[in-house]
Image (cartoon, rainbow, N blue to C red):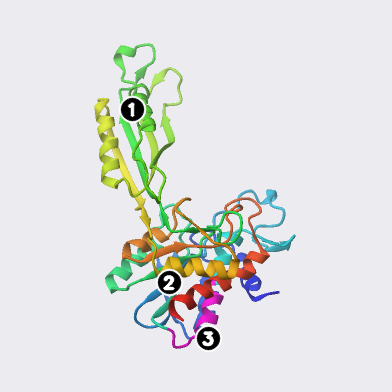
């Protein structure tokens, strides 16, 4: 068994469903400590965060990942138990195999090899790992760590996130940015009453429907060279008392913007609320910004990643800003150049999640080469 396969199996075997790390970070910390990394455990609430550094000063290169996984789903639907890692048909199966314990293992091994080969490397190389990436709030994960970094004045120049970004083969896609995510929880008040007396009620379902239709049809922006246009999606509508003959007095709706840098949070909020007011609604909206849009322009990090992918994988990567959010959204505001590169994502969060063994073997080489090009 190869070292990367062995370490990935050891991590996948631990049922580290958010935010329970199940000792994964202790394994990583012990290995890196043997390689003379300074180890710091930053625990906030129920969340474990590992900050491991080697070297000093600038520039600072950080490899970013998470040890938590989503729940397995129906265990009986898996071909093999989700937390009993299994190799078959050239793939490693198990929850977290692709998202992202293989990436965390690869970054750890790459850092061990890098500091052994380059003990006097330039600047600082680091690993930042959280157990709260897959959770609904992420408040005590990288978001909280970044608050601590701001307090300390900790700089980050370059950040490589090992999320499974590839589409068909390792390295074919490199994420150079992400859309922002802005959610709204809308409450529209009406007047409850009997359906047989429409003159005595104000039906919030009827009142809000035209406004929601307009919001859904709105062209929020045209996008730009890095991003597609901003999208608006309604994810839930809830009203009613359970009785068929009662008009409800309240409607609640949830919606989300995935927005690009052509729009701002303020403009999206103001335009949304202007539409709601125009229809005379008695409403309130609770807004939740989980991440700003960001994009990393061509620079030292993107050039190093492109060169490493070409050398290790034999392909030219495509720059992309698609997909959902990742913890990179918390690092980018520090002024860091940020990219995401990792294994293929076809099976992530699914039954029988897996990673190809040939991809797995290349992952440490890829991260090692990035570190050598930037700090070697």
Instruction: Compare residues 100 and 134 and report the one nearer the observer.
Output: 100
Q: Is residue 30 visible?
A: no
Q: Are marks 2 and 1 in contact (CB under 8 Å)?
A: no
Q: Magenta region: which residues?
A: 107-121
How far is mark 2 from mark 3, CA to CA? 18 Å
> In which quadrant is the N terminus drawn?
bottom right
Task: Read off the residue under disc 3.
Answer: 117
Horizontal side of residue 119 vs 151, given as left or right: right
Q: Alpha-carbon neighbours of circle 2 within 10 Å: few (<14), some, or many (≥20)?
A: many
Which type of secondary structure does the marked residue at label 1 adopt? Answer: helix
How far is mark 2 from mark 1, CA to CA? 45 Å
Mark carried by residue 211: 1
Where residue 219 sits: x, y (%)?
36, 35
Relative to 250, say whether 47 is above or below: below
Horizontal side of residue 89 vs 247, given as left or right: right
Q: Which is nearer the N-term, disc 3 or disc 1?
A: 3
Q: Is residue 93 visible?
A: yes
Task: Read off the residue under disc 2.
Answer: 62
């Amino acid at each position: 068994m190869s070292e990367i396969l062995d370490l990935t199996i050891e991590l996948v075997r631990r049922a580290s469903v958010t935010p329970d790390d199940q000792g994964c970070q202790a394994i990583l910390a012990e290995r890196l400590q043997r390689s003379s990394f300074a180890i710091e455990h930053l625990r906030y609430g129920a969340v474990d965060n590992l900050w491991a550094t080697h070297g000093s000063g600038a520039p600072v290169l950080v490899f970013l990942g998470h040890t938590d996984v989503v729940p397995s789903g129906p265990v009986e639907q898996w071909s093999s138990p989700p937390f009993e890692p299994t190799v078959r048909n050239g793939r490693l199966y198990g929850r977290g195999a692709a998202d992202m314990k293989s990436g965390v293992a690869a970054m750890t091994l790459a850092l061990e090899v890098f500091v052994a080969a380059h003990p006097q490397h330039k600047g600082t190389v680091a690993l930042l790992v959280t157990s709260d990436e897959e959770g609904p709030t992420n408040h005590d994960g990288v978001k909280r760590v970044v608050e601590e970094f701001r307090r300390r004045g900790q700089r980050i120049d370059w950040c490589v996130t090992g999320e499974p970004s590839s589409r068909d083969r390792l390295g074919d896609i490199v994420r150079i940015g992400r859309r922002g995510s802005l959610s709204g929880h809308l409450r529209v008040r009406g007047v409850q009453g009997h359906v047989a007396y429409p003159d005595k009620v104000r039906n919030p379902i009827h009142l809000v429907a035209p406004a929601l239709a307009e919001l859904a049809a709105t062209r929020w922006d045209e996008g730009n060279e890095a991003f597609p246009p901003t999208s608006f999606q309604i994810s839930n509508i809830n009203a009613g008392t359970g009785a068929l003959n009662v008009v409800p007095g309240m409607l609640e709706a949830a919606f989300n913007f995935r927005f690009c840098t052509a729009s701002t949070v303020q403009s999206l909020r103001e335009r949304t609320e202007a539409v709601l007011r125009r229809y005379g609604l008695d409403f309130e909206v609770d807004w939740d910004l989980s991440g700003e849009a960001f994009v990393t322009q061509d620079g030292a990090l993107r050039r190093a990643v492109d060169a490493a992918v070409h050398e290790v994988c034999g392909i030219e990567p495509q720059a992309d800003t698609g997909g959902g959010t990742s913890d990179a959204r918390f690092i980018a505001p520090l002024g860091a150049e940020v990219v995401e590169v990792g294994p293929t994502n076809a099976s992530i969060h699914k039954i029988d999640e897996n990673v190809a063994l040939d991809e797995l073997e290349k992952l440490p080489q890829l991260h090692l080469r990035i570190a050598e090009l930037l700090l070697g």
